[in-house]
Each structure stands twice: as structure tokens, then as C-alpha cells.
Amino acid sequence: QVQLVESGGGSVQAGGSLRLSCAASGRIFDVYDMGWYRQAPGKERELVAHINRNGGIVYADSAQGRFIISANNVWNSIYLQMNNLKPEDTAVYYCNARHYGMATDWGQGTQVTVSS
């Protein structure tokens, strides 16, 4: 199991930027992929972006060209740089870690609110 703690959420106006961070602790050696998901009120949780240990990155269409996911060298933190934010980006953003044994861990989430 891995403990995930998100930070960096907040309120911004449309067009602004935020940088989310996720700090991981515990069985990090067993994690092969980490990512960001979000859930808006009344909607299902959806993928934003994820990155694996080989550096492979996948972005949702909504994030492509505006958001950048990255990880530190020791693979215990990931980040999400969000630029040109839109009101539809308003959601709770969750950090996710997937293990080689297919187990998944989630953080508690951080609120991002974008006003028009």
C-alpha cells in the first residue's frame, strides 16, 4: 500500500495556472504508474493524465496541450502543471498509484475551482 497526499489546489480565474503535487510514501517500489484523476459534481471520476516508470505519459483529450504531468527522480512525487484553466476544469483532483500486482491507491483529493 502507498499513502498519497495531494496539495496545490485552489481557486483561480479562467486562463490562470495551478500546480498540483502528490507525495507518495510506503511501498513505492511496487508502484509502476501514477496519475491524476478528477471528479466534478454529479460526474464520474475521469482520467486527467498518468505517467509510468519508463516515462510513458498519457493525457486525456481535455488535458492535452494545457496540462503537464511529471515525476521526480526518486519516483515518490508527481506533479500536474495546469495552464489556461477553464471553468470546466473545476473538480476534485485525485492522485492515483497502480501497483504491479494491480492494486490501486488513491489520495484524499484536492479541490480546484476555476471561475469565469
Image (cartoon, helix red, strand yellow):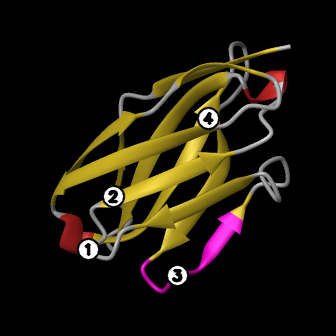
Q: Which residue is mark 2?
A: 77
Q: In the visual, does 15 lie left or right of 25?
A: right
Callout 1–callout 2 Cβ contact below 8 Å: yes
Viewer-nearest of discs 2 and 4 = 2
| Residue at the spot of label 1 | 74
Q: Quadrant of the C terminus?
A: top right
In the rendered structure, the answer to whether residue 86 lies left or right of residue 75 reads right
Tell me: 66 left or right of 48. right
Residue drawn at (43%, 49%) of the image: 96
* 4 or 3: tag closer to the N-terminus: 4
Q: Residue at x 27, y 62 (%)?
A: 76
Q: Nearer the viewer, residue 24 or 27?
A: 24
Q: Which residues are magenta?
A: 53-58
Q: Is residue 45 above or below residue 64?
A: above
Earlier along the polypeptide chain: callout 3 or callout 2?
3
Q: Position of residue 33 (x, y in %)?
A: 44, 68
User: Which mark lies nearer to you, 4 or 3?
Assistant: 3
Choose top left, top right, bottom left or bottom right for residue 32.
Answer: bottom left
Separation of marks 1 and 4 at Cα, in angstroms:
25 Å
Query: Residue 52: x and y, percent?
Result: 48, 75
Sequence-wise, the earlier of marks 1 and 3 is 3
Compared to residue 18, the image places residue 13 above or below, namely above
Residue under label 3, please give it: 55
Amino acid type at image mark 4: Arg
User: Which mark is nearer the camera, 1 or 4?
Assistant: 1
- The residue wearing badge 4 is 38
